[in-house]
Amino acid sequence: MVPPNDTQNSIQEEAILRLAAIVESSDDAIFSKTTEGVITTWNKGAERIYGYSAEEIIGKSVDILIPPNRKNDFPLIMSKLKKGERIDHFETQRFTKDGRIIDVSITVSPLKNVQGNIIGASKIARDISEKKALERRKDDFISLASHELKTPVTSIKGYTQILKKLVAKDTDPSVVKYLGKMDQQISKLTNLITDLLDVSKAAQGKLDYKDTQFSLDKTIEGIIEDIQHVTDTHQILFENKIPVTICGDQERIGQVVINLFTNAIKYSPDADRVVVRMEQEGDTVQIHVQDFGMGIPPHARSKIFERFYRAYNEEQPVYSGLGIGLYISREIVARHNGSISVQSILNKGTTFTVSLPLKLV
Ligand code: ADP
């Protein structure tokens, strides 16, 4: 190989200096560490965010930045890096020099030597404390507002049911009909408030669960019956019913199934059926809910489980909803050590699959 001449050397040096200037002037914290976690470089952004100067921290372990409740971050990050994978926008918390805990979004990439061996990692950390504080305020507001709404709506529901019982046999049939409609709408409102309460609880990992052994197929059957009472546009066909008992929270798993059925009906206005199918593979049972509706655009498929995400918000605001049902469903399924996934073909239909272990580990 021909050694580089002086001109090539100075071009390379200039490129390195330019790169260093970019890193130095970044608002984000940019630093590197060895595979053992010893900090090797530290830019001005890192000084601003964490409060340590480069002299103070280079040579020290990244441990001093990690709060006790986030100690698992390090092995998790290292195991990914060792496989040569990078970690993108991982949201976590870090300690600053003056003892504050800040919210950061970090991106970590493996650093390799000329032989291609991993010798450490480069980290970019962005301070997202303000964004997180805003999110927390929003969650608190949603939680407070739904708590305040719950009491009056519950009593309206109670009075409506008393009224339904009180109406005499010879009452004008339209009064009975309107009372029934009123009751249905109040039930919708109650469900909406429960969902809102759940979404803020889920965000804090505080959804409550009551675990029992229950029959999954009978639970699905019961839900189909309830839904068919109020749906005359679609028929829900239950195929391959497998009698299985699982361990978990029956009401919460029911909530997931109800959400999948109501979505399947809502997003397939031109279809007349929804198919639910069970499958069992070893210690895992699967529930497939298939509709023949509009489908989900490819770019939206990975996002529909995020809080408040709605695939059709702009173009088709006709479909009512808040974009929280699937978020709550995913939380519930994860708590049961299961998974939820989606397959969809645009304008043909969508199938959601929930996999659950038979025993809660
Ligand atoms: P919501 O239905 O209230 O908007 P969800 O969290 O249940 O909230 O669903 C999130 C988004 O996923 C929906 O807004 C919709 O865009 C999309 N989606 C969910 N289920 C289906 C389905 N069966 N077919 C097409 N799109 C769906």
Image (cartoon, rainbow, N blue to C red):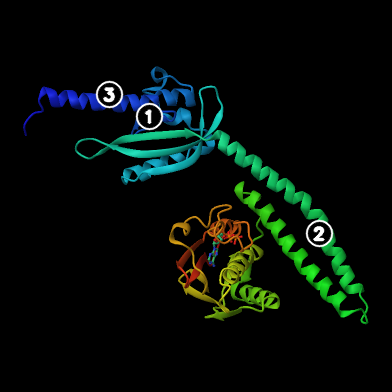
- The residue type indicated by label 2 comes to Thr
Would you identify the image quadrant in which residue 7 lies? top left
The front one of 109 and 314 is: 314
Q: Nearer the viewer, residue 252 or 137?
A: 137
Q: Which residue is mark 1?
A: 31
Name the residue nearer the viewer: 138 or 174. 174
The circle drawn on residue 154 is 2
For ligand 1, tell me if the residue under mark 1 lies within 8 Å: no
- For disc 3, the marked residue is 17
Instruction: Give the class, few, some or many, for how many residues have Cα within 10 Å of label 1's Cα (few <14, many ≥20).
Output: many
In the rendered structure, find residue 14 and report the number of the disc placed on it. Answer: none
Spot occupied by residue 79 in the image (x, y as percentages of width and height): 37, 44
Kind of element beneath mark 3 = helix
Mark 1 secondary-structure assignment: strand
Q: Position of residue 276 (x, y in %)?
A: 54, 75
SS of the residue under disc 2? helix
Q: Is residue 193 visible?
A: yes
Q: Quadrant of ligand 1?
A: bottom right
Q: Where is residue 301 drawn, in percent x and y? A: 47, 59
